[in-house]
Amino acid sequence: MTAAAPTETPAIPMTVEDASAMMEAANEWLKTSGIEFATNVVVALLVFFIGRMLIGWIVSGARKAMQRADVDKTLETFLCNLLRMVLLVLVVITAIGMLGVQTTSFIAVFGAAGLAIGLALQGSLSNFAAGVLIVLFRPYRVGDWIEGAGVSGSVEQVQILTTVLKTGDNKKIIIPNSQIMDSVITNYSANDTRRVDMVVGVSYSDDLDKVKKILEEIVAGDERVLAEPAVTIAVSELADSSVNFVLRPWVKTADYWGVKFDMTETVKKRFDQEGISIPFPQQDVYVHNVRDD
């Protein structure tokens, strides 16, 4: 028994009436939805281009405001670019909404992406926040000698995420801003003047008045020592093997190390010339001979 061959459905020819009805439907769509869609496209384009113009004005105003506030150039560029990007995303979402597209899903996607990026870069964001605080509050500037996060050196660069130091022996140290802001920062260059603290020990047999006079002459002979505040020269301690004087002259910050080194050398030479002894730790050993009877 053979299967019957499938029968083909004969094509229904399009009549003039059907074509006329389709044309009328197309014209009706153009009169209603078509014109509305074209209007929405025009409005969306206007929103986009006008929004871009407004973004340029806003970013330019923000840049000028930060320049007047003497904001760091690196931070200024970063914040302006970030502001431009955020505003541009808002303009694009608004323009898409003008086309009748639901923007809720776009906002959800951007929110999820922002959350994921924030979690992935939380360390960098912490350094960025610390960098903003450094630029705003200026605990140190380029050229200052600071101590922080367990290291010390001269500040070469203050970047958005890191601070670059150069040590006294010309090593480059890069410190994350969050670490340096979480530590105690000592800025040795913040003030124009510094006090040189020195301790000079002399023997108990030396004439203390003579020692004090010599120290006064040494200080008076150094032109880098400031007249105000007055220098302090006084007996500070009666130690085990020496009488200790404190010598505390005030100098300009730039002269600190030069005065300290030169004055230490001068004290030793003058004491040698004047017969003033500088005690040093020593130990006497006594040997007793014991005879066996």
Image (cartoon, rainbow, N blue to C red):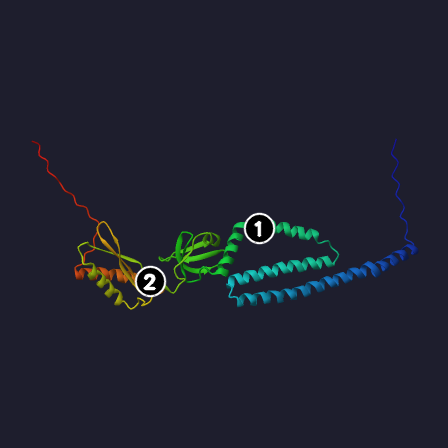
* Residue 121 placement (x, y as % from top left): 55, 50
Q: Residue at x 22, y 63 (%)?
A: 213
- Residue 230 position by quadrant: bottom left
Is 172 on the left or on the right of 243, as rendered? right
Q: How many marks?
A: 2
Say which amino acid is labelled 1.
Answer: Gly
Q: Residue at x 52, y 61 (%)?
A: 75
Frontmost residue, 189 versus 226: 226
On screen, residue 233 above or below 183:
below
- Residue 44 position by quadrant: bottom right
Frontmost residue, 224 versus 258: 224
Q: Residues within 10 Å of mark 1 (few under 14, many from 20)?
A: few
Q: Residue at x 47, y 56 (%)?
A: 162
Frontmost residue, 271 versus 125: 271
- Residue 244 position by quadrant: bottom left
Q: Quadrant of the N terminus?
A: top right
Q: Quadrant of the C terminus?
A: top left
Frontmost residue, 191 versus 135: 191
* Residue 71 placement (x, y as % from top left): 51, 64
Q: Secondary structure at mark 2?
A: helix
> What's the mark number on residue 256?
2
Is 15 on the left or on the right of 117, as rendered? right
Is 40 on the left or on the right of 61, as rendered? right
Q: Residues within 10 Å of mark 2 (few under 14, many from 20)?
A: some
Say which amino acid is labelled 2.
Answer: Tyr
* Residue 51 placement (x, y as % from top left): 67, 64
> What's the mark number on residue 118?
1
Q: Tell me which label, 2 or 1, sits earlier in the chain.
A: 1
| Foreground label between 2 and 1 | 2
